[in-house]
Image (cartoon, rainbow, N blue to C red):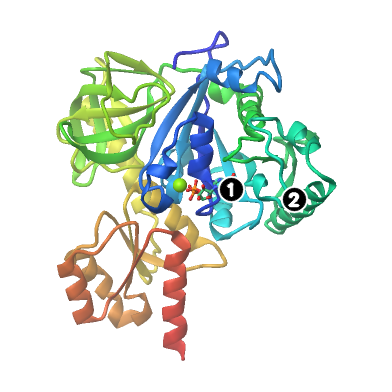
Amino acid sequence: SGQSEYNLRSPICCIMGHVDTGKTKLLDCIRGTNVQEGEAGGITQQIGATYFPAENIRERTKELKPDANLNVPGLLVIDTPGHESFTNLRSRGSGLCDVAILVVDIMHGLERQTIESLNLLKMRNTNFVIALNKVDRLYGWKVCHNASIVKAMKQQSKDVQFEFRTRLTQVITEFKEQGINTELYYKNKDMGKGTFSIVPTSAISAEGIPDLLLLLVQWTAKTMSERLTYSNIVQCTVLEVKVVEGHGTTIDVILVNGVLHEGDSIVVCGMHGPIVTSIRALLTPFPMKELRVKGSYEHHREIKASQGIKINAQGLEHAIAGTSLYIVGPDDDVEDIKEAAMEDMRSVMSRVDKCGEGVYVQASTLGSLEALLEFLKTPEVSIPVSGIGIGNVHKKDVMKASVMLEKRKEYATILAFDVRATQEAQELADEVGVKIYTADIIYHLFDQFKAYIDNLKE
Ligand code: GDP
Ligand code: MG
């Protein structure tokens, strides 16, 4: 952690993209560990943050550019299965993720979650680079471990180079169809001004990884120096609320700015009101390990931004992910801070359709609820919402949704994102005729609801 001589903090980077494009593998490759193979069916189940110190990045990129001036202390990379971390890295509706890697499989091109990711990136106005992954799958690819992509490409046969260019052109066209200009990063003269950069990579043999790292760090330091200027005003967001053996309920947070100390009084937004508590332990995984890898944690007296931190404190059971963590300073009025902590939730919760007709929406975190509401509002989708909630679907939610049975039967529906319905809730729903759809990918919810509507029309 710490700061650079220019007083910049580390950029925070999310990895997004369709399932199986290689997000986890890419992170493993950068890190030089193997989380992916330990996962159930290769599916990323949890979220984590990994901090890459500048020295490590310099080591990985020295062949590409030996005297690279990195200017930032490092890079904090977040793994984002199902967009969860990205949507929770928010503060009052704006994004805290400084830059994202959008992973596209060169053999598949743009897929539905790629487009969903693009929409989230647009909604939060977040800059990103595209990792065009799995170049080693091109027929006849000659492996050049950890080589820069230009160097690796020179080693390839004419046929491989031809297939690469054909697929690249196809992907560029597909991005164009989404209204996004893209170009190979080393040809992109317009980076950050409307043309997004593509870095071809392999997460297996690491071609293009030096390029990706160097691009991310140099580009963010150069173009975002204002945004990345370290500030000692604490800016901290709750990524996940988790029960950990021996620690009780903990919160995984990303500290974007400022310093946290053991013993600090904090306020976080809770399901049943503001939670006022104090930091019992500040924990981080050991360097180059990930927050989600089981094992022992390092204790800290204080931690400076940017960092992914696990906080142990009393009373966190009902904390809501996607909300901000506040520090109560010696001169602060705790009532004001409680108010501020809850305001975040109130502003999202107030975004229901005023006409009173619409579906009921339930999500696991404030960040995902916000993303889902945003999605339902888009012209192509346009589904009105009359009520919202956070957490599992309970009987009371079914009761609220059932009000629509009288008005618009099709809206007597609960769209539950990344949460489940309790058994009693499901039974009540079946009894009164409320539909509950659950999914952990936004567009799956939309598909289910649309199929239901189409069915009703017939
Ligand atoms: P995620 O769902 O996006 O996290 O994808 P994973 O990282 O779990 O990768 C999905 C599958 O693709 C796994 O079997 C990986 O081994 C494989 N994979 C990922 N990246 C590459 C790559 O660059 N080249 C090849 N050949 N396979 C890859
Ligand atoms: Mg994964």
Say whether disc 1 or disc 2 marks the residue closer to the N-terminus: 1
| Residue 251 visible in the shown view | yes
Q: Label 1, on which residue?
A: 122
Residue at (66% x, 51% y) in the render: 106
Q: What x and y, as percent, mark residue 272? A: 18, 46
Q: Looking at the image, which residue sits at the far top?
A: 5
Q: What x and y, as percent, mark residue 273? A: 20, 42
Residue at (38% x, 41% y) in the render: 47
Which amino acid, by three-letter code, is at mark 1?
Answer: Lys
What secondary structure is found at the residue carrying circle 1? helix
Q: What x and y, as percent, mark residue 306? A: 44, 23
Which amino acid, by three-letter code, is at mark 2?
Answer: Leu
Q: CA distance from mark 1 to mark 2?
A: 22 Å
What secondary structure is found at the residue carrying circle 2? helix
Mark number displayed over residue 168: 2
Q: In the image, is the residue at mark 1 within 8 Å of ligand 1 by its beta carbon?
A: no
Q: What x and y, as percent, mark residue 8? A: 54, 17
Residue at (42% x, 20% y) in the render: 305
Residue at (32% x, 42% y) in the render: 321
Question: Does residue 391 sit above or below 236 in this rendering?
Answer: below
In the figure, residue 433 lies in which quadrant?
bottom left
| Residue 92 visible in the shown view | no
Question: Does residue 241 sit above or below 379 in this rendering?
Answer: above
- 131, 415: nearer the viewer: 131
Q: Looking at the image, which residue sits at the far right?
A: 158
Q: In the image, is the residue at mark 2 within 8 Å of ligand 1 by its beta carbon?
A: no
Q: Is residue 312 left or right of residue 204?
A: left
Quadrant in which the N terminus appears: top left
In the figure, residue 428 lies in which quadrant?
bottom left
